[in-house]
Image (cartoon, rainbow, N blue to C red):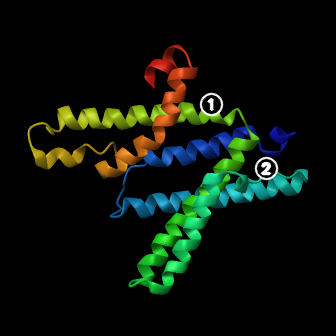
Amino acid sequence: MRDKIFNPIATKILVCFFLALQLFPPICVLDVTSLRHFFVCLFDITSIGLLTYWVFKYKINFQNPLRFLPIKIWLLLIIYMLVSFLWAINVIESLATWNRWLVIIISVFILTIFLTNNIKLFRTLVYITIIISFINVLVCIIGYYYLDVYISQRNNLMLNGGYGNKNIFAVCLLFKLPLLYYAVIRYKKFWRYSS
């Protein structure tokens, strides 16, 4: 019954779009982070529209994402950030940062709803994570050997996996590692060795 509510093809397209945002190049933009947050907002708006349509059309409720402890912790973080406006030195910057975190937690809500109501979607999530990780590592290898990173320390900034910053690349890779480990343990042949 849940597969009738959440169209598997539409949810796969939305999740693939959300994960492919990592690979979007910074075209004519000074701040890549703002552009990616804009696309995450588009993902949120589209997903909320589709969820509302599916809920009203089929009159069936989905599982509550608030039953997961990490979601509750993120909500506490958002509330704490909202309260911290009272003693913020730069309120405008605090509002911008809070807005970015709010967009991310809405995306986590939506992805949790999609993943808990469509078990087959997790496999797509693992496949897309493997592909994106492979592209990130390939960008680093190309940067190392073809952009002469090993010769000059100034070129060291090129080892960013396509994220614009090597610290952001390291954090993104850290979040991908559980899915990559899962693929090594559970999958066979091509997907196991490529992860």
Residue 10 visible in this rendered orientation of the protein: no
The residue drawn where x is 59% and y is 66% is 76
The image position of residue 161, as x and y in percent, is 33, 42
- Residue 193 at x, y = what percent? 45, 18
Which of 55/104 is in front? 104
Q: Residue at x 36, y 54 (%)?
A: 26
Image quadrant in which you'd find residue 158 = top left
Disc on the earlier residue, 1 or 2: 2
Image quadrant in which the C terminus is located:
top left
Residue ID at (36%, 63%): 31
Q: In the drawing, what numbered circle is on residue 123?
A: 1
Question: Looking at numbered disc 2 in the image, what kind of residue is underneath it?
Answer: Gln
Q: Secondary structure at mark 1?
A: helix
From the viewer's perspective, tell me whether residue 184 is left or right of residue 138.
Answer: right
Q: Which residue is identified by label 2? A: 63
- Labels 1 and 2 touching (C-beta < 8 A): no
Residue 127 visible somewhere in the drawing: yes
- Residue farthest to the left, as pictured: 151
Helix, strand or loop status at disc 2: loop
Badge 1 density bin: few <14, some 14–19, many ≥20, Cα 10 Å: few
